[in-house]
Image (cartoon, rainbow, N blue to C red):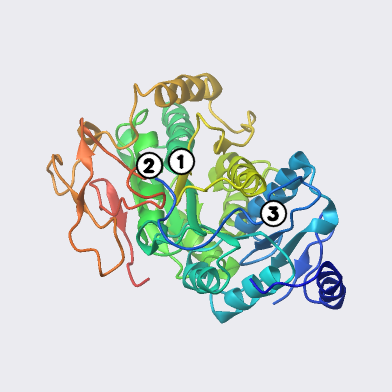
Amino acid sequence: MKKKSLVLIMIFVLAAVGILTACGGNSGSSGSSGGSSGDASGGAEGGAADIKVGFIMLHDENSTYDLNFINAAKEACLNLGIPEENYMIKTNVPEGQECYDAAAEFADAGCSIVFADSFGHEDYMIQAAKEFPNVHFCHSTGTKAHTEGLANYHNAFAAIYEGRYLAGVAAGMKLNEMIEAGQFKPEEAKMGYIGAYTYAEVISGYTSFYLGAKSVCPTVTMDVTFTGSWYDETAEKEGANKLIGAGCKLISQHADSMGAPTACENAGVPNVSYNGSTIDACPNTFIISSRINWVPYYEYAIKAVMKGDSIDADYSGGLAEGAVMLTELNESVAAEGTAAKIEEVQLAIETGKLHVFDTSTFTVEGKTLDSYMADVDTDPAYEGDTEVIADGFFHESQYRSAPYFDLNIDGISLLDTAF
């Protein structure tokens, strides 16, 4: 990072106010172990009043995905006592060179740590990390920190598959209730799922959701359709309507708009959302939602910079760490007994008695998996895959923070794989 006097930094910040809007009440709105190399030293070692933090968001508050990050950024900074003028949020930053530009602007503005929230931001965050070795760059959902070897570049995700599994339990309970009410036969218990892309992150998510539902409704099957976009309200609504028309009795999603939930509300089909509650818009169909709580990670990383400590190359917290959460259950839609069942299953996950990807609970092409070599190292310089099945379960997010479960298990049908 270029060295500037305090006066010059203040002048730059004032000049840049039209580009980077200090957040708190106002957000900007424009279109393992640590690595072994680099020169990051904590940067703003000292108190909360001294540190400056930058946040880069793919979309704005209209995206449930980005709103989850925005709310966490504000909460973490408030909890740490960071003044509003010392943290900045830049929204609607595409997965392109614009991300590097935003990261560099934050670094030049005096930020000691910069966060980005979308998969496609990664290469541009790495570019910034190499140019500004005294600034920490933390990227959510990326895969390259453990192979880049930069002391100031870090990946973070969460064991969201644990939350997806619990949401699936709620879905399965609802299907059972509908079956008992005579709305359809057990063999007709089919769910639908709208995914953005055929990435491992999405596959891991919908598979864990399905396994949660299957744990209580053994006859359930699921159809999955893809939109080719993280946020496309029209495509997500069309996808939900297509699945409903194909006989799906309940819909969930890994896409960021209100398209699918509103389609479910209009059709009277139960819905399990993602990243936050949609009960206000969908009071008659919303059941529950899982989400990543980014507050623990934001606080951990910012505190590390304040103390001059290293930051893990890969972070993945789960239910036990408070990094994965469920929204409040909509009792008026959820099946009776759902809350107690979720509590029971959550305890089993947290204590290690239950593993989401227990290989005895699913098959692939009719066979139980006893070995799987996963593509954990995405860097071409690292050859060979990693064995991820041991002790009877697939060890998701153990060898890097981002998901790498990419198997198509029996019971799940993909309607299209163009994305």
Circles 2 and 1 in contact, beta carbons < 8 Å: yes
Which kind of residue does numbered mark 1 sit on?
Arg
Question: Residue 418: where, in percent of width, then height?
Answer: 34, 72
Q: Residues within 10 Å of mark 1 (few under 14, many from 20)?
A: many
Q: CA distance from mark 3 to mark 2?
A: 40 Å
Tell whether 199 sits left or right of 360.
right
- 257 lies above or below 17: above
Q: Which residue is mark 2?
A: 208
SS of the residue at dot 1?
helix
The residue shown at (76%, 45%) is: 47
Q: Earlier in the sequence, mark 2 or mark 1?
A: 1
Between 337 and 230, the one nearer to me in the picture: 230
Q: Nearer the viewer, residue 273 or 397?
A: 397
Checking the image for residue 288, the label placed there is none
Does any portion of residue 198 appear in the rendered image?
Answer: no
Name the amino acid, label 2: Ser
Q: Earlier in the sequence, mark 3 or mark 2?
A: 3
Q: Decide: marks 3, 2 in contact (CB < 8 A)? A: no
- The residue pinned by badge 1 equals 164
